[in-house]
Amino acid sequence: MQNRDSAAPMEDFDGIGGAQAPSIDLLAILRGVLRRWKLVAAITLSVLIATYGVVKLIVPSRYKSTVEILVYDPQQQIDAAVQKPISPFVDAVGGDAINTEINILRSKSVALRVASELGLDTDPDFQAPKKLQIGHLAEWLGDAAKSLGIAALAERLGVADLAERLDFAGLARAYENSAEPVSAADEKAERLDRAADELIKRLDIYQDSFIIFVSATSRDPIKAQRLASAIANDYLASQREARQEALDHVAAWLKGRMDNLQSDASEAEAAIDKLKVQSGVHDTESDKVAEQQIRALNTQLMTAREEVSDKTAHLEQARHVIGANGDIDSIPELTASAALTDLRHKKMELNWSLADLQNKFGEHNPQVVSARVALAAVDKQIRAETENILGTMKNAYDIAVRREQSLEANLQSLTANFNSETSVKLQQLRRAADADRKDYESYLAQYNNIVEQREMQSASARIISPATFPRSPASNRLKFYAIGGIAGLGGGLLLAFLLEYLKPGVKTSTEIEQSFGLPVVGLVPLVSRQKTHGRSYYQTLDKVVNRPGSQLSEAVRSMRVGLELSSASSKVILITSALPGEGKSTAAMLLAASSASSGKKTILLDCDLRLRSTSEVLQRNHQPGLSEFLCGAAKLADVITQDPVTKINLIPAGSTTQNAADLLMSQGMLDLIAVLRSSFDYVIMDTPPLLPVVDALALASGADKILVVVEWCRTPRATVSEAFRVLGPEANRVAGVILNKVDFSQLPGYGGYQYRKYFDTAGSSV
């Protein structure tokens, strides 16, 4: 048994009644929760069983069939040469295109087509009732009763035929007759709409690269396969229709554009012929040659101007980057130089080497200085190479400018010798006619390609894996079981935590010391639940007297030794408690029996003149006692008796009296304590509890030490604190607390220690 600081003097102790509650010991609470593992396991198992029953009743088995569709970008199905110049649509590539196809698969239009094709408007699996009808509810409750096995119970309770007696079927018919009539077409449309909504809920569509996986669920595996296959086929049919519509639209646009170009070319030819007639120009061989030369020069001049513009931009960009010490990787001419690339790599290596040398040797080391010199030399070579490349770029620019100027001069010379105004107009008209013919030929090729694709009817997607046949249900019941198990475990842990946290009583010596600053002078084990009066109670006291190795004997002996060590002059011990039933009389008798068995001359006073518990247990409640002595009706020698089993000297309570507190506060009681102090080694007083009556407070001033009995795991801390407050100034006499009725088998769960191997197992069962 644990005895912590029982020898500490209590004369300087103050403020017991206002003691603060200790901080929450989460570790102790956790131990208590683990000690209640059976409760947690029972709750978890119960919730799992309930979840299993509810899920089996409510959640039906579902079968899932999956089809795989390979989707191509629809824009890539039409030739890129057609799309670039003419497509009026926005390109959809990457994830956006796939997401678009997924949304099409989930669309209401596809669902309606599948619902109509498979006749889902008449399928009960896809026709959830619009309203909960009374007849259906009665039928569902009947099926549930049979599934749960309570049909026989319903018959015994007389509610099995409740549906027939209340005429649920008649009420259902009356309700259906009262509804407004609808046409067959409207009813079918509504059923198809409900079926389509239900079908969309049962679709699971996801993508992996350009493959779309479409899964459909149903209670029937064959129906699940049919649904997945129908969804994929209808999607492909809608894609073909959309593609055909797009190709028709593009073909019509191309045809209109070709007609316009052909008309423009014809008008240009007519204008050329008219201009020749008006100006008298004839298509001589020399005129044709001149026109061809002018056209060639114009083309060359345009190319030269573009080259000059390009070289100017490159030269200016290179000068700007070099001047700003920017990134030369953006200049192709600079990056193309092998010598410059080698120099840059060499500079990078020197920079790394210089940084490493600086970290190792500092700024003024000769190796660092040498590395800087080498780096400067490389920088100079880079600048020189860069200037060479810029010079080359400048020369190329100058050559392009001179070529442009030469072409302009040649063109001016040639056009000066040609019929200026008329020839210019002819050239313009001919260029326009040539451009229209060229565009017409391009659009004609594109139109022919579109017509071929339209006739081929190529699909933009295809099924690469047909709808699978589900051989086992793909139900999500396991998820519900997991949720139920987690909820049950959490609920069990929470309940165990609350039971431990809200448990009012103190459980360990640490709680007593933290709450009230008092030591625990004894842990008295829990006595077995049996009748504790008469001869059976002597068996308990016999464990203290005749079985010194028992757990109970060791606990009482530790309490007695702690009192002796606390003060050699502590002869008068008052034992009380906060509330009745905490075992103060038991503790007083056990302490007296232990003291007597150790050879100490001990006397036990039953000062509880109201209940007389000690006198009744020791069978001395019918002889004169303390009340008769204090009233003067008996002498001291007449009221002192000795118990033959425990050898305890006892002054019983005597007869009941109405003024118990006055008798205990009388001078006669003080004189009696003084006489007993001089005649006995120990005087142990069993007093009433502190909170119901003031008898113990009346005796407190005459005691050397006070022991307060607290029932383990039952008496609230607030109650103990109130008891100390009632003691007032006499609280300084409190030597400590006795924790009574301690279950040592559960004590380790609250942070206590295991002592069984130190006790006599034959005598430890109390």
Image (tube, rainbow, N blue to C red):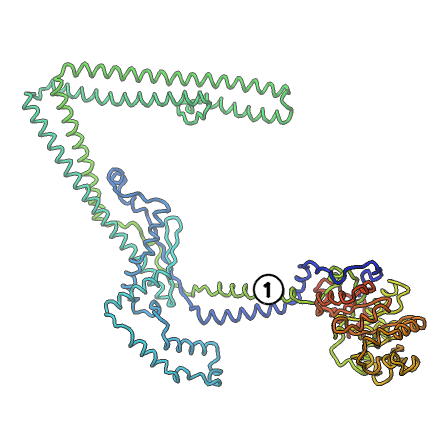
Q: What element carries label 1?
A: helix
Vertical side of 516 occupied by 539: above or below: below
Quadrant of the image containing the N terminus: bottom right
Q: Is residue 436 left or right of residue 682?
A: left
Q: Where is residue 379 in the image (x, y as percent from the top left)?
A: 51, 19
Vertical placement of residue 532 versus 438, above or below: below
Indicate whether 579 appears above or below 205: below
State whether residue 760 appears in this view. no
At 36% across and 77% down in the image, what residue appears? 135
Q: Residue at x 14, y 26 (%)?
A: 430
On the image, the x and y values in percent for residue 383 come to: 47, 18
Q: Name the residue under label 1.
A: 494
Q: Where is 758 relative to 618, above or below?
A: above
**Which picture quadrant has residue 300?**
top left
Instruction: Count how many numbered circles sit on residues in the image.
Output: 1
**Which corner quadrant of the image does residue 201 belong to?**
bottom left
Residue 548 x, y percent position in the rendering: 85, 72
Q: Nearer the viewer, residue 455 or 149?
A: 149
| Number of residues whose C-alpha sits closer than 10 Å to that of mark 1, classed few (under 14), some (14–19) or many (20 or more) | some
Q: In this view, does 569 lie to the left or right of 613?
A: right
Q: Tell me if I can see residue 723 in this picture.
A: yes
Splitting the image into 4 quarters, where does residue 557 fall?
Answer: bottom right
The image shows residue 338 at horizontal and vertical percentages of 44, 22
Residue at x-position 74% and y-position 59% = 514
330 lies left or right of 577: left
The kind of residue on which mark 1 rests is Leu
